Image (spheres, helix red, strand yellow):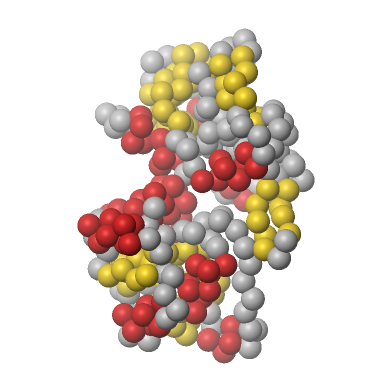
Amino acid sequence: MRMFQVCVCGQPLQLNEQPTPQPRGSEVLLKVLAAGVCHSDIHLAEGWFDLGGGKKLSLADRGMKLPVTLGHENVGEVVAVGPDAKGVKVGDKRLAHPWIGCGTCQPCQRGEENLCRAMRSLGVFSNGGYADYMMVPHPRYLFDIGDLSPARTAPLACSGVTTFGALNKIPTLKTEPTVIIGAGGLGLMCLALHKAMGGHSAIVVDIDPVKREAAKKAGAKAVVDGSAANASQHVIDMTNGGAWGVIDLVGSSQSARVGYDSLIKGGKYVIVGLYGGDLTVSLPPIPMSEACPR
């Protein structure tokens, strides 16, 4: 089978070939039908995340071993199953949940594998979907997509679950406006889920006028130019004193400054994006305002 792998960080993906693996135990082999490209894949190919101030977070230090096949947003067709794999059969089309833990630590045992310190995430710490075939360790990580298109469904494994998780962290979702920073793929996914979850209204912040227009067409109540010097003040004015909930889908120094400065007393700021950078904040206002960065 063919696979596109990171063999040397900072260099283009390399096309390699190896025999198609055969599932053992509870493993399930998928023929990849669709594999999304996430912005995180760029960081993974580079091998590091920007921590600001010239500092870097090395993915090799976090356990990523090369070569590795990228791709953590995947839909595939079941082509083979191990003898202990129950609940799936050859021909099924499934979305693969990529955030796989060790299965034995306390977070994994209580159903929070995303908090595992020994992750086996597809496309990060084990081979992902930029290949003809992909192995999934257990059927519990596979979800029936019904009649949905594989290409439309694959991003749900990352942009879908991350924005859904972020929205669930906003306690005022249904009673106050939610500020969404970033109107790219994540932002538009977040807008769609915000509406589906009965969100009160959404104010979208982005530096790109084309993306701000896309956000308005997707249902945003208002948009703000994130590059404006008074962007936070615009948000404060629109929310009658500050935002109760801000979801930052960019995660840069600039977006973090806008998001944090837009909060009302008791507001909550949730960072999802991994663009990189740092944020310097004064400490006394944090307990004074009961602001909650997350």
Horizontal and vertical percent position of residue 230: 42, 81
Between 137 and 193, the one nearer to me in the picture: 193
Rendered position, 50 above or below 129: below
- 154 sits left or right of 175 in the view: right
Horizontal and vertical percent position of residue 114: 58, 47
Quadrant of image for the C terminus: bottom right
Horizontal and vertical percent position of residue 156: 40, 42
Between 78 and 18, the one nearer to me in the picture: 18
Residue furthest to the right: 61
Rendered position, 94 above or below 268: above
Q: Is residue 109 visible?
A: no
Query: Which residue shows up at 62% across the image and 51% down it?
Result: 115
Horizontal and vertical percent position of residue 209: 33, 62
> In which quarter of the view is residue 113 placed?
top right
Query: Which residue shows up at 36% across the image and 32% down it?
Result: 151
> In which quarter of the view is residue 290 placed?
bottom right
Q: Is residue 286 visible?
A: yes
- 210 sits left or right of 26 in the view: left
> In which quarter of the view is residue 68 placed?
top right
